[in-house]
Image: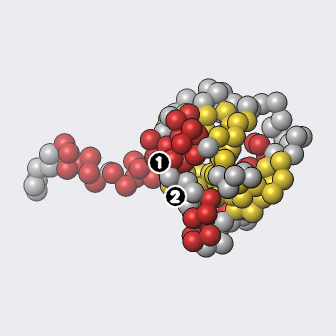
Amino acid sequence: MGVQQTHPRRLALHTSTTFESLSAPQFGALCFRTMENGRPEILLITTRETHRWTIPKGWPIKGLKPHEVVEREAWEEAGIKGKAKKKPYGFYTYLKRLADSRTVTASVEVHALEVKEICLNFPETGQRTLIWLPPIEAALQVPEPQLKELLAGFMANEIGKIGS
């Protein structure tokens, strides 16, 4: 009959399958602008369903690189036009409730996006609230601990060091 497996050992055999089926990649835009005093401000938007503060983000889009997805999401969700860095600024995870009521762990690859233009009319105009805040204040508004750390530690003058 072989070696009897304990329950944890049986579960361990299925760990990768469980994580793969219950995790979802997303790409997020850390949209920033530099004020006249040289200090950065970060854009936060509300989610459509729960009205929590977050950054623009979305699912992968076939044919687009992650930084291109970030640029598109910033435009669609907040009317922001700018150039996103190709190299990620950081990562965070959160629990995402899907339309079918399942909950998955979303892993968000965050790219810094320097704002070049703010448009008043964009695809999701009126569906979200937008606010510009200094990094520490922005960090206080979001619920996800890892996103809080990314926002609190953001310094616009450091972005040049992470590459284009």
Q: In this rendering, does residue 106 appear at all?
A: no
Label 2 element class: strand
In this rendering, would 61 be left or right of 144?
A: right
Label 1 element class: helix
Q: Which mark is residue 90?
A: 2
**Front disc: 2 or 1:** 1
Q: Quadrant of the C terminus?
A: bottom right
Residue 118: image location, x then y, percent: 83, 48
Residue 109: image location, x then y, percent: 56, 56
Residues at circles 2 and 1 in contact by the CB criterion of under 8 Å = yes
Q: Around disc 2, counting alpha carbons within 10 Å, would you say few (fewer than 14), some (14 to 19), or many (20 or more)? A: some
Query: Which amino acid is tagged 1?
Result: Glu
Q: Quadrant of residue 126?
A: top right
In this rendering, would 7 be left or right of 111?
A: left
Query: Which amino acid is tagged 2?
Result: Gly
Cα gap from disc 2 to disc 1, whole angstroms: 10 Å
- Which residue is nearer to you in this view: 68 or 33? 33
Residue closest to the far front = 37
Q: Around disc 1, counting alpha carbons within 10 Å, would you say few (fewer than 14), some (14 to 19), or many (20 or more)? A: some
In this rendering, would 9 be left or right of 164?
A: left
- Which residue is nearer to you in this view: 98 or 58? 58
Which residue is the site of mark 1? 149
